Amino acid sequence: MFGKATVVDMIERSAENDADRRNFLKTAGLAGLGVVGAGAATTLGAGSAVAAHAPSDAAVLNFALNLEYLEAEFYSHAVYGRGLPSGITTGRGDRGGVVGGRKVNFSSRAVRSYAREIAADEINHVKFLRGALGSAKVSRPKIDLRNSFTAAARAAGLIGPKQTFDPYANENNFLLAAFIFEDVGVTAYKGAAPLISNKTFLEAAAGILAVEAYHAGIIRTNLYAKGTPLIMAARRISWARDSLDGKRDLDQGIGTTKRANLVPTDRNSVAFSRSPGQVLNVVYLTPERRRRGGFFPRGVNGAVATSDDNA
């Protein structure tokens, strides 16, 4: 079947450190292959070219888990008035609390129903990724659902320098806040796909990407249906994201009153990607190289935690 080099490479790419690899070997019953020993240790120390220059599959999935914690907390508070159960927030790294968040008084039954379904999906994503990562999973980092939205709204020009933005104040604010997350989630999973070598993990990530795309479509469609004020507000949020994640003008609003743009794509109708660093630029609310800020005031947990320098 697999040669030693292949198995070693699989282990390198499926765990974050030596302890994870040993646990993986023990769980998978691979010790009999003889890869645990002096010769294997030398190979593991050297690593493959890919492993030396790319994050492991577990590191990529943990990066995604941080984003899922953020989305799940946002939607859970909006729908249920509470955050995630403590039992699904533990793991490696410092576990942080959640600042802000409360139940939204939705004005329409439809949007309330959409929000409830999305909340359930995001909570399930957290559970799924935690299960897939096992002992390698990271804990929920500190999340800010209050000050970060005000900073984002000011950066987008939605409010003045002394005003505050409450994403839970009403249905319109909720939709605009959700718009910030969902588009970023889609581009994050697409950008992370080339970094994942394990086909099982890749298929799972593709499945989550599809769900995030459905969510983004729901949010974009409902914003567009609200008319000119929210169409223009979404455009400003898009401009703000573009100012953070690099010099290329990739992000797209939801269109104009005359023409909808509910599916942001390139000329080939292919969704664009963001690198993990670019995603962190957006959620840290900075165009500079940083390890914390914005929605994650103490940074995310795991190996992939630094934003790009796009200043």
Image: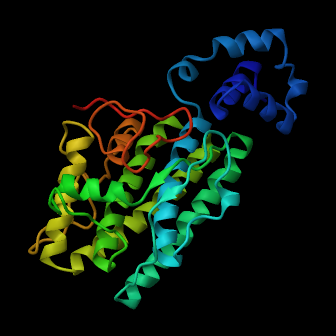
Left or right, 49 with respect to 28, comes to: left
Q: Nearer the viewer, residue 187 or 281?
A: 281
Residue closest to the far left = 258
Q: Is 207 placed above or below 117 here? A: above
Q: Residue 25: where, in percent of width, then height?
A: 81, 31
Q: Quadrant of the C terminus?
A: top left
Residue closest to the far front = 162
- The mark tally for this picture is 0
Residue closest to the far right = 32
| Residue appearing at x 40%, y 62% in the figure | 213
Q: Residue 53: where, in percent of width, then height?
A: 50, 21
| Residue appearing at x 88%, y 26% in the figure | 31
Q: Residue 174: where, in percent of width, then height?
A: 34, 72
Q: Is residue 289 visible?
A: yes
Q: Residue 216: where, in percent of width, then height?
A: 36, 65
Left or right, 137 with respect to 109, comes to: right
Q: Nearer the viewer, residue 191 or 89?
A: 89
| Residue appearing at x 31%, y 45% in the figure | 285
Q: Is residue 267 visible?
A: no
Q: Residue 176 falls in which quadrant of the image?
A: bottom left
Q: Is 163 placed above or below 26 here? A: below
Q: Is 222 placed above or below 32 here? A: below
Type of colouring:
rainbow
Q: Residue 145 falls in which quadrant of the image?
A: bottom left
Left or right, 150 with respect to 102, comes to: left
Q: Quadrant of the N terminus?
A: top right
Q: Is 192 placed above or below 42 here? A: below
Q: Nearer the viewer, residue 160 or 245?
A: 160
